[in-house]
Image (cartoon, rainbow, N blue to C red):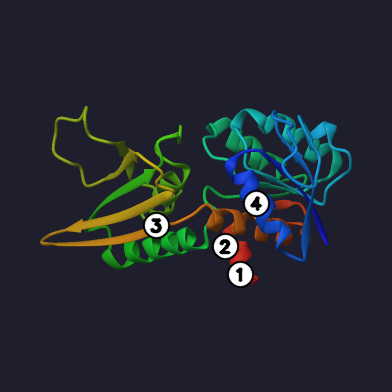
Amino acid sequence: MVKIAITGANGKMGKVIARLIAERNDCEVIAGIDLNTDRNGSFPIVKTPFDLPAKPDVIIDFSHPSALNDLLSYCTMNGVPVVVATTGYTEDQIAEIRKTAGQIPVFFTFNMSLGINLLVELGKRAVNVLGGQFDIEIVEKHHNLKKDAPSGTAIMIAEALNGELGNKMHYVYDRHSVRKPRESTEIGLHSIRGGTIVGEHDIIFAGHDEVITLSHSAASKEVFANGSINAAVFLSKKEAGLYDMSDLLAES
């Protein structure tokens, strides 16, 4: 039985994760971490990782970028694997996450959905087939409470496609300040915020007289929660290193 602590336990995702773990028989929540310490289940909730009443086998983090330093410090000091599922990190914070993976197991991805990661793989395949002859635009849509834009997932998609193209592309965010024809080396990224959209991502390949669109739509937060739980169980058995969804899928 894998013992899990949830960072952001009283947030929307934290509550979904706790509910889904309660339905499984291979793991359990032993504690939560949240500035709001109101108890929402059968486990205690504390303000910082250093207040945890017992050492977990792994921590799932769905909180806020400001919590990263304490989280990585605790996990490094205590040898606790961590699933980092929060978005909105700076480049320096991402570098710190990768550095920490040299000491403990770290699972880091911009999106925990199996479908999204398949979308990325299909996008990479399309880039290789189309040979850079199509313009690439990425459109992401989320609910009106999401703070970061573009989404971490949109950036993940762009970087994956750019890597297939030899990292020769540059990113253009929206086009309201651009007054010139589109360059062939652009990847456009566009953000839409509204209502209760859980998450939608489109990769548009626009060529001469034809358009190919790859799309993914999440209907609930459960797709991300289940992904993070599976990642936690997977990570609890691993040595130090940086892992992502491709590693998890390889063992499925």
> Residue 55: x and y, percent?
87, 44
Measure how far apart labels 1 and 4 are at the Cα level. 23 Å
Residue 162 left/right relative to 91: left
**Residues at marks 3 and 4 touching, judged by CB atoms closer than 8 Å:** no
**Quick one: label 4, few (<14), some, or many (20+) residues within 10 Å?**
many
Q: Residue at 52% of width from left, 35% of height from top?
A: 88
Residue underneath mark 3: 217
Circle 2 SS class = helix
Question: Looking at the image, is mark 1 or mark 3 earlier in the sequence?
Answer: 3
Helix, strand or loop at mark 1? helix
Q: Do the residues labelled 1 and 2 touch (CB within 8 Å)?
A: yes
Q: Name the residue under label 2.
A: 246
The picture places residue 225, in percent across and down from the top left corner, at: 60, 54
Task: For marks 4 and 2, give the CA distance.
Answer: 21 Å
Q: Residue furthest left?
A: 209
Q: How far apart are marks 1 and 2 (CA)?
A: 6 Å
Q: Nearer the viewer, mark 1 or mark 3?
A: 3
Tell me which amino acid carries mark 3.
Ser
**Residue count near mark 2 (Cα–Cα under 10 Å), binned few <14, some 14–19, many ≥20:** some
Q: Looking at the image, is mark 3 or mark 2 earlier in the sequence?
A: 3
Residue named by callout 4: 17
Vertical position of residue 51 compared to residue 125: above or below: above
